[in-house]
Image: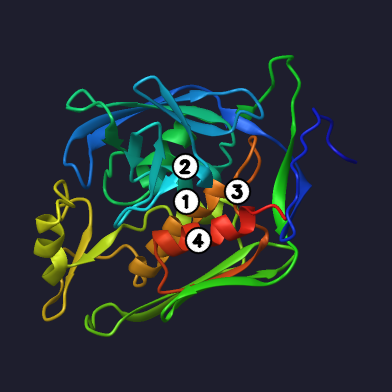
Amino acid sequence: MPLSGAVNAIKSSRLLSWKPIGKLQQTIANSIQLSGITLHSGKITTVKIYPELAQKGRYFYFNSTIIPASIQHVNSSPLCTTLCKSNHTIRTVEHLLSALEATGVDNCRIEIIDPSSQDNLSTEVPIFDGSAREWVDAIERVGLKVAEDSSGSSCEKLAPFLNEPVHVRKNDSFIAAFPLPKGCLTYGINFPQVPAIGCQWFSTASLDDPWYTREIAPSRTFCIFEEVQTMRNAGLIKGGSAENALVCSADKGWLNPPLRFHDEPCRHKVLDLIGDLSLLAQNGNQGLPVAHIVAYKGGHALHADLVRLLSEVS
C-alpha cells in the first residue's frame, strides 16, 4: 500500500527517473551543535544543525547567505568539496553530507559559525577525527522524525533510479554507473608508490543505515607523508595532524596506527563518494542514485562530474 503524503514531483532526466521508495521524508528530531578544528584553514568553527520542513532539503546558512547542498553550487577545489554562492564558500562539506545522506536526514538547516573569519566570505566544516563517526553519533543521539511541510503534511521520499549505463573518466581514473534495482557501491584505489596502501578494492551490496554506521562512518581520511609539506606550501591542511588523518610513508608505512579496518583508506573513499553523490538530492529526496556505481582512483572532482552528468535534464 503506498504511503500517504504531499505531492513531491521532480522532473526526470534522460538518465534518471525519480520514484517513491516506500518511505517518508525525515529530519532530525532536535538540533545538533558541534565545534572543532578545520582541516585546511586550521580554524575552530561551530556547526549547528536544525530540523527543517519537508521538501526544503539540506542547505547551509553562513553569514546570512543560504547555500543549498546541491551540485549547482559546487566549486572546484583541491582535496575537498566546496559549496559557493554569492562569493560565500564553505569547504570540506563531504563528511557531514555523507552522514546526513546515509542516516536519512533529508531536510535540515546547517548553520556555520566562524568567529575567526576575517573576510566573512569563506568558512569550513570541522574535520574532527577525519571520519564521519562524530556526525553519525550526534544524529543518533537526537534521533529522526518524519518531516512535515508548512501545512502539517508528510511527504513521500523519492530516489533517483538510473535508466542506462553512464561513465566519467580522467586519464586512468573513472566512475561508471549501471542500472540496478538496488543500490550498491564498488571502489578501488591504487598507490603503487606506497606499499602499505597499494591496490585496494571495497564493495558492498547494502547501503542501509546500520551498515554505513558500522562499516563506513568510522573510516578516516588519509595522506602520504612525503606529500604533506607540498600541501602545506599550497596553503592546505593547516589544521591537519595525526589526530585527524591517517598518515602513511612510502618507506616506513603507517606512522599513526592502528587502522580501524585493514582497507580503511578505500572505505574512506566510499564515505566521500556518498557525500558527493548526496549533492544530487532535490527537495528533500534521496541523493544517492539507485544503481551499481563503480569507481577507480576517483576523487571529489570526478565524483562531481558524475553528479553533473546525472543531473542534466535533456
Mark 1 and mark 3 in contact? Answer it, CB < 8 Å: no
Q: Which amino acid type is marked by label 3?
A: Gly
- Category of crowding for the residue at label 1, using alpha-carbon neighbours closer than 10 angstroms: few (below 14), some (14–19), many (at least 20): many
Rendered residue at 29%/51% (across/down): 130
- Describe residue 47's horizontal placement relative to residue 308 as left or right: left
Which is more N-terminal, label 4 or label 2? Answer: 2
- Category of crowding for the residue at label 2, using alpha-carbon neighbours closer than 10 angstroms: few (below 14), some (14–19), many (at least 20): some
Q: Position of residue 288 (x, y in %)?
A: 60, 53
- Category of crowding for the residue at label 4, using alpha-carbon neighbours closer than 10 angstroms: few (below 14), some (14–19), many (at least 20): some
Q: Which amino acid type is marked by label 1?
A: Gly
Q: Position of residue 263 (x, y in %)?
A: 36, 71
Mark 3 to mark 4 CA distance (whole Å): 15 Å
Residue annotated with mark 3: 287
Q: Nearer the viewer, mark 1 or mark 2?
A: 2
Say which element carries label 4. Answer: helix
Q: Position of residue 208 (x, y in %)?
A: 60, 53
Rendered residue at 73%/44% (across/down): 158
Q: Which amino acid type is marked by label 4?
A: Asp
Mark 1 to mark 3 CA distance (whole Å): 9 Å
Which is more N-terminal, label 1 or label 4? Answer: 1
| Residue farthest right in this picture | 1
> Observer-nearest residue: 83 or 159?
83
Say which element carries label 1. Answer: helix
Which is more N-terminal, label 4 or label 3? Answer: 3
Residue annotated with mark 2: 73
Residue annotated with mark 4: 305
> Observer-nearest residue: 118 or 249?
118
Residue annotated with mark 1: 275
